[in-house]
């Protein structure tokens, strides 16, 4: 792709005023030092969408969306970063001189070839004749013309060189067609079409570019040929990073804060034709971390379709941990008595499907249920094995309170003592202690949480206060992952010499991080200038000297002293052991 030079991006950043930019899209009303509006990213009756001219950022306290001027254009027009920069450059009359390097040029040619191929396949589907059985197949599966259009479905004719010839004539070179995976050399050495006599499903990037094809055989006469084949891995396509249909589902998924993940192209189409738009498909059995990241960019909840038989449960156990690890909430949906969502919706209706999705059990519960139902008739050993089976999944739940609730449920179902199970899972005995005891650690955690938040808020606004702490306050001093991420980003901004809030926000690639930043920046009032130093010092000492942080510091000292004088070492080690034993109690 052609690249926009960094200095041009900087110029666009500086010259785009957030109030001007946003008010081109929605009417803004002045409210004090900032502006308000009805949020364009979620439906609401009272305005919770805030624009701060001072900080050049926006944040919606209703849905959490936030960012700077570029982010706003990206979200509102549903376009990529470079595209948004172009839009803004256009609006402020900045000319973009693009640079192009060789690798980018090759990629760009592949994208163009994929696009041309997709158009070719779509046209062939529209033209009658050879495609009659295909049309019949689509009709049978309830795929409307509208869906064919939305998903760009096409037809690869059963000819050797139909596409290759067409693309070569259009000016594409052999190398591009080969590296795009559209054509391949025959045994005679000439270039032939990779896909022949197949229904073509374009696979899109997150931004909506055609990067590959999935191809389904229509004429089942040839039993030797596989029913589905895919594009090979290419410079623009990695199977591991894509979810089919996510680009078309992302707006609905954002709105619902939930994505339904099904198994194949036809399942996705079946749900779409029933008007359920927040769905995408995963090919293969296990999720990859890249797919998990892609999902987290659009929502926090995933409903995954599983078979309830043993193979299905085993597959689920393998594929879900990566989603839990990234902090997604996972529900397990099973459709009893049918082979796929298509059949389910046709026989039992859309309403029933939606009801099942809403009632789908959270994944930990699904695991507990499947573990315990297998062990129901068994003795002590089976039960033990079932409980042990479920424990790793409980450990992965990021939220302490949520985890502790599932520990309780599993303990009840298995008829074992909650304390025993807690010790195994390793959860802190928070919710289950006596009311009087539970108070103190809860309060302490809250105080630390708040102290971290205030600290980050001040650093975000006034990076100069960081100078005294940047060397002592490490990312690990912050307790929650969100706070760690924010601090890491502020440090990164400091290294890059960025101090404007809008620029720091612009550094955040991750959706969640960016939203947390704008919220942090706009939700809290700053302290009086004269008090800030005191506040920073108080909060930093709380963050630095939490019991965990103290133990860590002591341990480091003990380890550092190990190589030095033995007296010093013993002293430090004693302190460390003492702090440990306090924790164990
Ligand atoms: Zn909103």
Image (tube, rainbow, N blue to C red):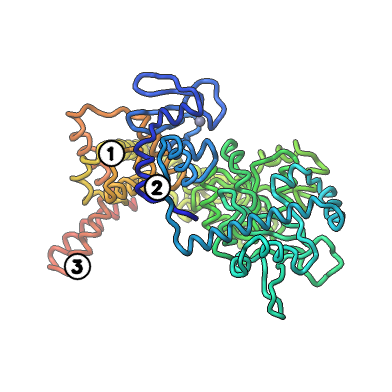
Which element is circle 2 on? helix
Which element is circle 3 on? helix
Q: Residue at x 78, y 55 (%)?
A: 124
- State which mark lies toward you, 3 or 2: 2
Closer to the N terminus: mark 1 or mark 2?
A: 1
Q: How far apart are the alpha carbons under marks 3 and 1? A: 34 Å
Examine the rendered structure and indicate whether residue 43 appears above or below residue 280: above
The answer to the question of whether label 3 and label 2 lie on touching residues, with beta carbons closer than 8 A, is: no
Q: How far apart are the alpha carbons under marks 3 and 2? A: 32 Å
Task: Say whether residue 559 is left or right of residue 373.
Answer: left
Query: Can you see residue 221?
Result: yes
Closer to the N terminus: mark 3 or mark 2?
A: 2
Q: Residue at x 22, y 56 (%)?
A: 554
Tell me the residue that label 1 is attached to: 455
Tell me, for residue 481, which label it has, or none: 2
Q: Who is closer to the viewer here, 135 or 173?
A: 173
Task: Say whether residue 112 is left or right of residue 550.
Answer: right
Closer to the N terminus: mark 3 or mark 1?
A: 1
Specify the quadrant of the image occupied by residue 134.
bottom right
**Residue 108, position in %: x, y?**
54, 58
- Residue density around tag 3, few if under 14, some if 14–19, many if 20 or more, within 10 Å: some
């Amino acid at each position: 792709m052609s690249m926009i030079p960094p200095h041009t991006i900087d110029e666009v950043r500086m010259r785009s005023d957030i109030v001007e930019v946003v008010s081109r899209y929605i009417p803004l009303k002045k409210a004090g030092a900032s502006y308000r509006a009805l949020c364009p990213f979620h439906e609401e009756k009272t305005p919770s969408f805030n624009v701060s001219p001072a900080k050049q950022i926006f944040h919606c306290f209703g849905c959490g969306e936030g960012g700077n001027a570029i982010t706003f254009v990206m979200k509102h027009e549903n376009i990529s970063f470079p595209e948004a920069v172009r839009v803004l450059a256009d609006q402020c009359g900045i000319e973009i001189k693009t640079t192009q390097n060789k690798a980018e040029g090759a990629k760009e040619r592949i994208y163009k070839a994929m696009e041309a191929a997709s158009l070719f396949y779509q046209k062939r589907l529209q033209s009658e004749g050879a495609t009659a059985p295909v049309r019949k197949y689509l009709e049978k599966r309830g795929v409307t013309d509208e869906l064919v259009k939305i998903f760009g479905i096409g037809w690869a004719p059963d000819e050797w060189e139909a596409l290759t010839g067409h693309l070569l004539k259009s000016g594409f070179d052999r190398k591009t067609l080969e590296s795009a995976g559209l054509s391949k050399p025959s045994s005679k050495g000439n270039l032939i079409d990779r896909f022949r006599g197949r229904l073509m499903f374009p696979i899109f990037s997150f931004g909506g570019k055609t990067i590959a094809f999935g191809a389904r055989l229509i004429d089942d006469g040839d039993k030797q040929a596989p029913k589905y084949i895919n594009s090979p891995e290419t410079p623009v396509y990695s199977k591991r990073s894509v979810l089919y249909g996510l680009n078309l589902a992302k707006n609905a998924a954002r709105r619902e804060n939930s994505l339904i993940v099904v198994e194949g192209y036809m399942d996705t189409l079946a749900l779409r034709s029933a008007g359920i738009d927040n769905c995408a498909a995963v090919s293969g059995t296990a999720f990859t971390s890249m797919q998990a990241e892609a999902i987290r960019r659009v929502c926090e909840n995933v409903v995954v379709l599983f078979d309830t038989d043993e193979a299905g449960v085993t597959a689920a156990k393998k594929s879900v941990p990566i989603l839990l690890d990234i902090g997604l909430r996972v529900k397990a949906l099973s459709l009893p008595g049918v082979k796929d969502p298509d059949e389910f919706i046709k026989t039992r209706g859309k309403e029933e499907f939606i009801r099942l999705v809403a009632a789908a059990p959270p994944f930990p519960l699904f695991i507990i249920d499947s573990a315990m139902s297998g062990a129901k008739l068994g003795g002590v050993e089976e039960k033990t094995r079932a409980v042990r089976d479920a424990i790793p999944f409980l450990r992965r739940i990021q939220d302490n309170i949520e985890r502790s609730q599932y520990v309780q449920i599993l303990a009840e179902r298995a008829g074992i003592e909650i304390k025993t199970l807690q010790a195994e899972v390793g959860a802190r005995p928070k919710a289950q202690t006596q009311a009087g005891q539970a108070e103190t650690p809860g309060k302490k955690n809250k105080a630390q949480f708040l102290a971290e938040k205030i600290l980050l808020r001040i650093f975000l606004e006034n990076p100069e206060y960081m100078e005294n702490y940047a060397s002592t306050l490490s990312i690990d001093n912050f307790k929650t992952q969100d706070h760690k991420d924010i601090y890491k980003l502020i440090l990164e901004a400091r290294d890059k010499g960025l101090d404007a809030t809008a620029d720091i926000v612009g550094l955040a690639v991750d959706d969640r991080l960016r939203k947390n930043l704008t919220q942090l920046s706009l939700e809290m009032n700053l302290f009086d200038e004269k008090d800030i130093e005191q506040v920073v010092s108080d909060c930093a000492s709380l963050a630095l000297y939490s019991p965990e942080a103290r133990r860590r510091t002591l341990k480091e000292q003990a380890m550092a002293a190990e190589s030095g004088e033995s007296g010093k070492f013993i002293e430090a080690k004693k302190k460390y052991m003492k702090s440990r034993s306090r924790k164990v109690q």
